[in-house]
Image: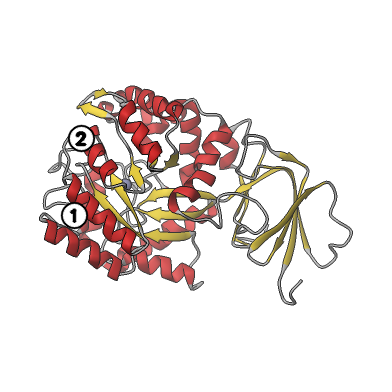
């Protein structure tokens, strides 16, 4: 072994490595530096005197969670209007402080990687870089900077407005020049922006393709916000990597799964990101916590379509859209629990969507599963989350790249 590399050994009742459906009983996990070195079972190996030992009786070791869609600068207040007002009136320093606090909270809840799908100016890149330099505590952050949108379009208040193809090209090039890890485009209107129309496409297929091609040339993927089927054909033609929300609505309150579109998503290896925000937690927290009955009523047909899509075989991740109303960033596990209930998933399927599949969708080959040579990103929870997903909220310890977030 190279001198100076730290070795750790962890034992627990079980370990779920993010592949398959079953856990390994009585695992011994050996970590070397930032990476998993070996996974065995039984007792600590006799030749492990050099390693520091951590025992987690009654606990399960999982890969660290990956939330593929968050907004670090948003505050998860109870009204979207209040969130928008705050984000547009605050100084960069105020936004930075909130984003840093959100990042820290996410990591402590077991989320070791987040993809930020929309911030203001360069705040999320700054958070990413501070964490990377070790100056702040948080998950690895992938930042798009701001999302590309039209003048009155969804998220125009984040400030990256582009109407014409020339403006769109300039906006995408600017984000890449400002260090974006991926490009985000708003392909339809959205719920937080009354001047936008979620039922209409904001850009044609050629414009979306231009954005995705600029990303590909810079080895960056593109994410498209799609809140109705009107946005899907363009996002598919552009071969964007991830379709955020992927709502199958064809009319305001009418959803229709389309197998032809789904087939193309599979053939092109596109991933859909299903949104388990605060609104979707109705079954667990009770409808009483949600005072806006309109959106809640339409969740049943939404989930039915998403279930069809999952059974059809479209690769999917589960994300929180953290920061939007009722969606604090440290409750991602609650969203996964809601997904088990609403999308009829096994707990293992929900965990895989937020670990292995999430890593694949983001092109992060070093994480998402616990296997030798992968990054040692761990979530240790009390109990057995493969039986009861509520256990994901009982965080016992979190490790990112071989380092405990707080010493267990
Ligand atoms: Zn979002």
Residue 297 x/y as whole percent: 30, 23
Displayed quadrant of residue 399: bottom right
Some atom of ligand 1 lies within 8 Å of the CB belonging to the residue at label 2: no
Cα–Cα span, label 2 and label 1: 22 Å
Q: Seen in the image, is 24 located left or right of residue 238?
A: right
Q: Earlier in the sequence, mark 2 or mark 1?
A: 1
Displayed quadrant of residue 294: top left
Colour scheme of the picture: secondary structure
Q: Nearer the viewer, residue 66 or 166?
A: 166
Q: Seen in the image, is 100 located left or right of residue 123?
A: right
Which residue does the numbered mark 2 point to in the structure image? 230
Q: Residue at x 43, y 60 (%)?
A: 141
Q: Where's the C terminus, which quadrant?
A: bottom right
Q: Seen in the image, is 395 located left or right of residue 317?
A: right
Q: Seen in the image, is 193 located left or right of residue 222?
A: left
Q: Nearer the viewer, residue 376 or 311?
A: 311
Which residue does the numbered mark 1 point to in the structure image? 157
């Amino acid at each position: 072994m190279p001198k100076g590399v730290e070795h750790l050994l962890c034992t627990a009742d079980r370990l779920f490595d993010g592949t398959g459906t079953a856990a390994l009983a009585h695992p011994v996990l050996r970590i070397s530096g930032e990476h998993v070195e070996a996974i065995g079972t039984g007792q600590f190996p006799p030749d492990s005197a050099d390693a520091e030992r951590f025992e987690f009786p009654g606990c399960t070791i999982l890969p660290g969670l990956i939330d593929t869609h968050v907004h670090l600068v948003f505050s998860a207040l109870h009204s979207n209007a209040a969130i928008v007002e705050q984000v547009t009136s605050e100084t960069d320093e105020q936004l930075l402080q909130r984003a840093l606090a959100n990042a820290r909270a996410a990591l402590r809840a077991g989320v070791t990687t987040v993809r930020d799908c929309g911030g203001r100016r360069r705040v999320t890149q700054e958070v990413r870089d501070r964490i990377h330099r070790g100056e702040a505590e948080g998950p690895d952050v992938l930042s798009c900077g701001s999302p590309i949108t039209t003048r009155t379009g969804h998220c125009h208040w984040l400030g990256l407005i582009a109407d014409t193809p020339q403006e769109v090209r300039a906006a995408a090039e600017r984000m890449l020049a400002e260090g974006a890890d991926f490009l985000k485009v708003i392909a339809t209107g959205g719920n937080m922006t009354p001047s936008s129309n979620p039922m209409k496409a904001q850009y044609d297929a050629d414009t979306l393709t231009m954005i995705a091609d600029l990303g590909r040339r810079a080895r960056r993927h593109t994410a498209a916000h799609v809140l109705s089927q009107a946005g899907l054909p363009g996002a598919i033609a552009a071969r964007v990597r991830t379709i955020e929300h992927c709502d199958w609505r064809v009319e305001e309150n009418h959803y229709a799964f389309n197998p032809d579109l789904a087939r193309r998503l599979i053939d092109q290896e596109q991933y859909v990101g299903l949104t388990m925000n605060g609104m979707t937690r109705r079954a667990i927290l009770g409808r009483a916590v949600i005072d806006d009955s309109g959106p809640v009523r339409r969740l049943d047909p939404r989930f039915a379509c998403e279930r069809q899509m999952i059974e059809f075989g479209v690769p999917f991740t589960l994300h929180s859209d953290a920061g939007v109303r009722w969606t604090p960033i440290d409750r991602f596990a609650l969203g996964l629990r809601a997904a088990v209930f609403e999308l009829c998933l096994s707990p293992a399927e929900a965990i895989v969507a937020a670990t292995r599949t999430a890593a694949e969708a983001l092109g992060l080959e070093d994480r998402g599963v616990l296997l030798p040579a992968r990054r040692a990103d761990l979530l240790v929870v009390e109990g057995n989350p493969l039986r009861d997903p509520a256990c994901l909220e009982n965080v016992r310890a979190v490790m990112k790249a071989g380092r405990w977030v707080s010493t267990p």
